[in-house]
Image (tube, rainbow, N blue to C red):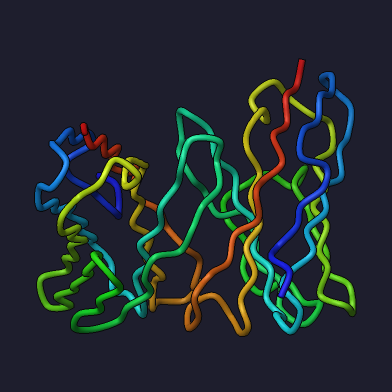
Amino acid sequence: KAGVTQTPRYLIKTRGQQVTLSCSPISGHRSVSWYQQTPGQGLQFLFEYFSETQRNKGNFPGRFSGRQFSNSRSEMNVSTLELGDSALYLCASSREVTSGRSLYFGPGTRLTVL
Amino acid sequence: KNEVEQSPQNLTAQEGEFITINCSYSVGISALHWLQQHPGGGIVSLFMLSSGKKKHGRLIATINIQEKHSSLHITASHPRDSAVYICAVVSNFGNEKLTFGTGTRLTIIP
């Protein structure tokens, strides 16, 4: 069974631009959650989608948004990029909602904002 | 004060030593995850537990719900165990988002 895939793996953008990251979960998994990892703040929860509905959201500004499609693939979007958005963005999938199941992480997308 | 505290922050040990990493949390939880992150960023979920103890190979995870504390043990440590170990909790109040500890960087010297 294929693991969680994320595209692109690396991305360089400039301030003010927007970016879209993609996450394809393991087949049969209906929950996708997104995380931001920075050296200063560590890992932080962004949001979780389950069956195309946003189930939970972390403490991030509205510039961060996401969605999930009927095939469970998920995208996250960051608009008006700031230097502080430079981070490793990870997604994870699970069969059911996060609280009750093991998580399977993708390799991450490393975003650099110049 | 962070909701999830890990100790130690850094740990260096000789190959073969018994390793213990601790995680304390201040909120009520429905589950706790132990994660392993190798250089390069990839994260592997080691355990998810809500009570008692789980064992997988040389890894053992325990949780004490009353004391709000969990430990990850590694027996017969090996250099390939060198990684950052992260504890994460799922709150059982309202928003069930994951809250992460800051991680423990483990280095095993041959």
Quarter occupied by residue B27: bottom left
As drawn, which residue projects farthest toward the front?
A: B110
Quarter occupied by residue A82: top right
Drawn side of residue B83 relative to residue B75, left or right: right
B108 relative to A28, above or below: above
B76 relative to B66, above or below: above
Drawn side of residue A10 relative to residue B2, left or right: right
Drawn side of residue A107 relative to residue A70, left or right: left
B46 relative to B83, above or below: below
Q: Position of residue B54 (x, y in %)?
A: 25, 79
Q: How many marks?
A: 0
Q: Position of residue B87 (x, y in %)?
A: 33, 57
Q: Residue at x 79, y 52 (%)?
A: A76
Quarter occupied by residue B45: bottom left
As drawn, which residue projects farthest toward the top?
A: A114
Drawn side of residue B64 relative to residue B2, left or right: left
Q: Quadrant of the C terminus of chain B?
A: top left
Q: Position of residue A25 (x, y in %)?
A: 74, 69
Q: Residue at x 69, y 68 (%)?
A: A32
Q: Position of residue B47 (x, y in %)?
A: 36, 70
Q: Quadrant of the N terminus of chain B?
A: top left
